[in-house]
Image: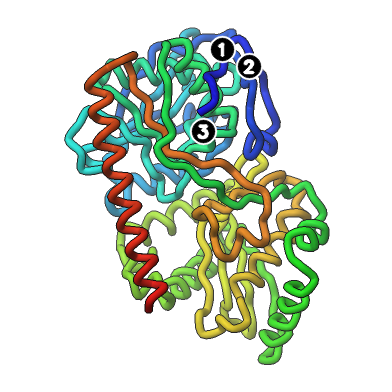
Amino acid sequence: MSAPIPADQVHAVSPVHAAHTPIHRVVMAERESAPARLTALASLPVDAWESLAAHAIEPNACYLPAWALAVAHHARGRGDALALAAFDCAAPDRLTGLMPVRWAKRALSLPVPLLVSWNAYAPFSVPLLDRDCAVHAAGAMIDAARTAGARALLLQSVATGGPAYAALRAALHQRSLKSEVMRSFRRAALDARQNEDTVLREALSAKKLKELRRQRNRLEDAGPVTFEIASTPEQIGPALEAFLALEAAGWKGQRGTALVQDHGDAAFIREAATALAARGQFEIVSLMRGGATLASGLMLRDAGRAFFFKIAMDETQARTSPGMQLTLDLTTHLCADGAIVFADSTADGEHPMIDHVWRERIEIADVFVPLSPRDPYALAIRALVAARYSAINAVRSIRRIKENLS
């Protein structure tokens, strides 16, 4: 792991470069945060939370209140969300930092004093830090975690090349603490400032583009295919129901993990999609033919970034790659949208489809943070967490072998 960033070597960076290049500087505060506290996520003042999200050094649409509170209220297994929250000394009602967390007993079934970043139904857990006092806010939340009785933090799915993580590392350096990456991977992203034709030509060979055009023509043999965008609350309702039905009809439905198969998950996505659409922060993109949905994707928007949350497709049309066709149209849409500069696929590393289209990469990691220097209890917790990761990797390897043999 690279050396900690000294706290006096920080300044602001653009959201695009923050997403996929090393960050050497983040905003250093003149205004200090008041001591933070551990509290119930649902108890936070929504107005202050929204103000923080709008002024965050690094956007995270998954931690917008309309999204996160819908997850906490409805989604299965996520109703125990807490928050490490920092406030401004000069204005105590002003939120300067927010890190949603859970105790490890609930998050990992490990009965140890470990706080784990909360997954708001999406693999991105970058904390919200006020850009004017990011390091102070991060430090206040670290101190609050220790005061609450935690001996360590486990931050899952954080962007280690972004300014929020750089601020966190600066705060750790001030406290003589060192973080450790437990797992990392690179996931696909899109620099939407580029021309869409350039993006696709550089990502896909002439042979592959020709094959995709042939598949598009085959899709259109049964009628014209259109790319449609639902973005208002009135449009979102029908488009979301079509997405939910399509997802449930595919492999996720067979596994029992489709959103609509759980009452709470279905309630969460319906509530969050409608609320965010009213704020211009949610879209559903669909590939349509004769009134039928061939492929559909859900997308969150925040502060110049898009988060491609989920995709579903008509698996009876798999030979014509409707999911890939939708992604090509989405790429064109995002590159033409002047409000979007960067898109996160939110996919796993080495994704078999989107990795071939979106060639930018975000470094994502799970990071272990002891809260006191040379704490033997934190070292023991770290060993338990490492053993858990090893077990998960073993299960995944066995699953891949079975899939390859089947």
Say which residue appears at 42% left-offset and 20% top-offset: 178
Q: Nearer the viewer, residue 304 or 393?
A: 393
Left or right of 257? Residue 161 is: right
Q: Secondary structure at mark 1?
A: loop
Q: Given this view, does label 2 or label 3 mark the residue nearer the observer? A: 2
As shown in the figure, which amino acid type bears the numbered disc 1? Ala
Estimate the x, y position of residue 404 in percent, counting from the top left: 41, 73
Mark 3 or mark 1: name the one nearer the start of the chain.
1
Left or right of 234? Residue 381 is: left
Say which residue appears at 50% left-offset and 28% top-offset: 1
Residue that badge 1 annotates: 7
Estimate the x, y position of residue 62 in percent, counting from the top left: 48, 44
Q: Secondary structure at mark 2?
A: loop
Say which residue appears at 27% left-offset and 44% top-offset: 388
Residue that badge 3 annotates: 50
Assess disc 1: are there few (<14), some (14-19) or many (≥20) residues with their C-alpha within 10 Å of its C-alpha.
many
Say which residue appears at 59% left-offset and 43% top-offset: 362
**Measured Cα–Cα span from mark 1 to mark 2:** 6 Å
Q: Which quadrant would residue 12 be assigned to in this image?
A: top right
Q: Is residue 58 above or below residue 140?
A: below
Q: Is residue 277 visible?
A: no
Q: Nearer the viewer, residue 219 or 400?
A: 400
Estimate the x, y position of residue 265 in percent, counting from the top left: 35, 58
Mark 2 or mark 3: name the one nearer the start of the chain.
2
Residue that badge 2 annotates: 10
Badges 1 and 2: C-beta atoms under 8 Å apart?
A: yes
